[in-house]
Every structure is written in structure tokens, then in C-alpha cells.
């Protein structure tokens, strides 16, 4: 009787495992289908793109990628996106990390109100602050410059950095800093050499989230840039017009090239990203 119970238990566990993996596979297919469809279109010729019924088996071609990469404006837009995204991430971390440390280590009257008020800017729709920003940058002479886009992205990514990193500083024992002080280190030295290495997962998580916000944005870049400073998402809109209609091959190829760097960076930092989102973003 006990043997039959064990066999039934194993079968039920096996059936449960198969059901879970089948559900996860179906869910993954649903989420990955748009990405796979875009990648497939980027490997088709113009005739294959408009074939009826759609081709699900074809000889892939790289002519769309060659055409996109040979454009001088694409390389310029890639450099602009890289400079703007890196600048926004670095500026957000340089301001947000010390601010989060101050919120965690130096509580004062009204600190909770000030901390939650930082999220107001993050909650506002981007279109609500776009016009005031444009007027401000026009008065300062920063319109159509990379710096204007960097400052605009920092405005929205900075509250996110403060929110995430404050939880990490709260979880970090004060005794670690105090032991460094006893050894003769100042607060500044202890912060750089003791605290920052221990919160590396949070820094990576915040960097990736800020990078995704800056790299994928279209609205601010479309308004605050010109042909010389436009980023990749703005350049992609150029493939949707013209005498020949929408260039689906060029648009999808550029789309794959745009999302590929962020995907590779996220996979490379996956371990730190999971640790950062599951710790600092929840606790504290």
C-alpha cells in the first residue's frame, strides 16, 4: 500500500512539474513572440516582408542590417544615445547615491515627506513637464543639445535611484562604518571604500533601470534634439516615412540593434540585477 502511495506521489509531482514547465514555456512564447517577429522581419527582403501568406521559412538575409549600419546618421545617433544614456546614468548615481545615504543615515524632521515628495516627479507623466523643460532650456540656451536631454532624463531617473539605494543603506549595518572609523578612516573614506563595494548589486540594478529609461526614450529626445543630436529612437521614426512607404526591413533591423546593447548588458549583470531588485527595492 505504501509503495502505491509513493508511486502516486511521484506521478503527481511529475505531472505538476510538467504542467509548470508547460505553462512557463507558453508564457515565455507569448512574451518573446513580438521580439522574434521583429527579428524575423529584419532578416527578410522587402518582397518577403509583404508576402501573403506570411513566410515562416525563408533564407535569411543581412542586407537590412548592412543598409542601416552603412548610414552615417545611424552611427551618429548611436553615439548620441551612448553619450546621453551614460551621462544620465552617471549623473543620477552621483547625485542619487549620496542623497540616499543621507536619507538613510541622517534622519531629520520632515525627511519622510521629502523622500516621498521625490517620487512625485517620477509619477508625473512625461508630457506634463516637457513644455516647462523646453522653455527653461530655451532660456538657458541648451535646446537641441545633449546636455538638455541628459538633464531631462536625470529628472526622472534620480528619484528611482534614491528609492532603491535608500533601502540598501538601511540594510547595511552601521557597525561596518564604525569599525572603519575606529581604524582611522573618515566618513568619506569609509563611504567610498567600505559602503560602496557592499552595495554594488544596488548600484548595478539602479544603473540598468536608468539606462533603460534613457536608452529607450523617444518623447524628450524628439523635442529636445535636432538632426545632429538625435538619438536612436528618434532616428527609427525616419524609417516610417518616405516615397516608398514604411521601410519595415530597416525599421526592424534598427530596432534589433537598438535593444541589443541593453539586453546584453542586462544579461551580463543579471546576478546583480536580481539581487538589487529583490533586496534594496523591497526592504527599508
Image (tube, rainbow, N blue to C red):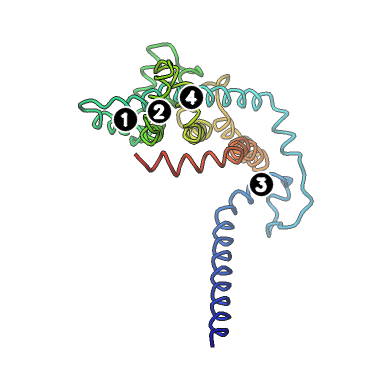
Which residue lies most toward the bottom here? 1
Which residue lies most toward the right here? 59
Q: Are marks 3 and 4 in contact (CB under 8 Å)?
A: no
Question: Residue 236 sits in which quadrant?
Answer: top right
Q: Are marks 1 and 4 in contact (CB under 8 Å)?
A: no
Mark with earlier residue (4, 2) = 4
Q: Are marks 3 and 2 in contact (CB under 8 Å)?
A: no
**Mark 1 vs mark 3, CA separation in Å:** 39 Å
Crowding at dot 4, Cα within 10 Å, few <14 / some 14-19 / many 20+, comes out as many
- On screen, residue 14 versus residue 90, left or right, reads right
Q: Nearer the viewer, residue 90 or 15?
A: 15
Residue that label 1 marks: 118
Q: Nearer the viewer, mark 3 or mark 2?
A: 2
Mark with earlier residue (1, 3) = 3
Give coordinates of residue 45: x percent, y percent: 74, 45
Taking the image as drawn, is residue 240 in sight?
A: no
What residue appears at the point 44 percent right and 25 percent down from the top-left corner?
92
Mark with earlier residue (1, 4) = 4
Residue that label 2 marks: 158
Tag 1, which secondary structure? helix
Amino acid at each position: 500500500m505504501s509503495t502505491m502511495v509513493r508511486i502516486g506521489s511521484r506521478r503527481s509531482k511529475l505531472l505538476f512539474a510538467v504542467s509548470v514547465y508547460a505553462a512557463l514555456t507558453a508564457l515565455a512564447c507569448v512574451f518573446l513572440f513580438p521580439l522574434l517577429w521583429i527579428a524575423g522581419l529584419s532578416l527578410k527582403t522587402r518582397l518577403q516582408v509583404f508576402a501573403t501568406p506570411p513566410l515562416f521559412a525563408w533564407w535569411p538575409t543581412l542586407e537590412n542590417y548592412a543598409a542601416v549600419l552603412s548610414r552615417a546618421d545611424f552611427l551618429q545617433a548611436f553615439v548620441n544615445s551612448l553619450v546621453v544614456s551614460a551621462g544620465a546614468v552617471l549623473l543620477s548615481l552621483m547625485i542619487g547615491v549620496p542623497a540616499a545615504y543621507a536619507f538613510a543615515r541622517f534622519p531629520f524632521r520632515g525627511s519622510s515627506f521629502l523622500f516621498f515628495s521625490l517620487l512625485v516627479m517620477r509619477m508625473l507623466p512625461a508630457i506634463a513637464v516637457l513644455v516647462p523643460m523646453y522653455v527653461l532650456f530655451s532660456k538657458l540656451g541648451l535646446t537641441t543639445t545633449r546636455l538638455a536631454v541628459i538633464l531631462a532624463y536625470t529628472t526622472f531617473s534620480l528619484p528611482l535611484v534614491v528609492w532603491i539605494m535608500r533601502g540598501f543603506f538601511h540594510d547595511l549595518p552601521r557597525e561596518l562604518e564604525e569599525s572603519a572609523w575606529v581604524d582611522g578612516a573618515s566618513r568619506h573614506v569609509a563611504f567610498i571604500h567600505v559602503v560602496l563595494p557592499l552595495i554594488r548589486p544596488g548600484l548595478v540594478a539602479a544603473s540598468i533601470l536608468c539606462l533603460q529609461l534613457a536608452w529607450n526614450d523617444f518623447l524628450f529626445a524628439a523635442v529636445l534634439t535636432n538632426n545632429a543630436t538625435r538619438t536612436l529612437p528618434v532616428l527609427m521614426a525616419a524609417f516610417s516615412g518616405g516615397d516608398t512607404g514604411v521601410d519595415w526591413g530597416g525599421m526592424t533591423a534598427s530596432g534589433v540593434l537598438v535593444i541589443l546593447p541593453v539586453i546584453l548588458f542586462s544579461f551580463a549583470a543579471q546576478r546583480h540585477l536580481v539581487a538589487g531588485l529583490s533586496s534594496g527595492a523591497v526592504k527599508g
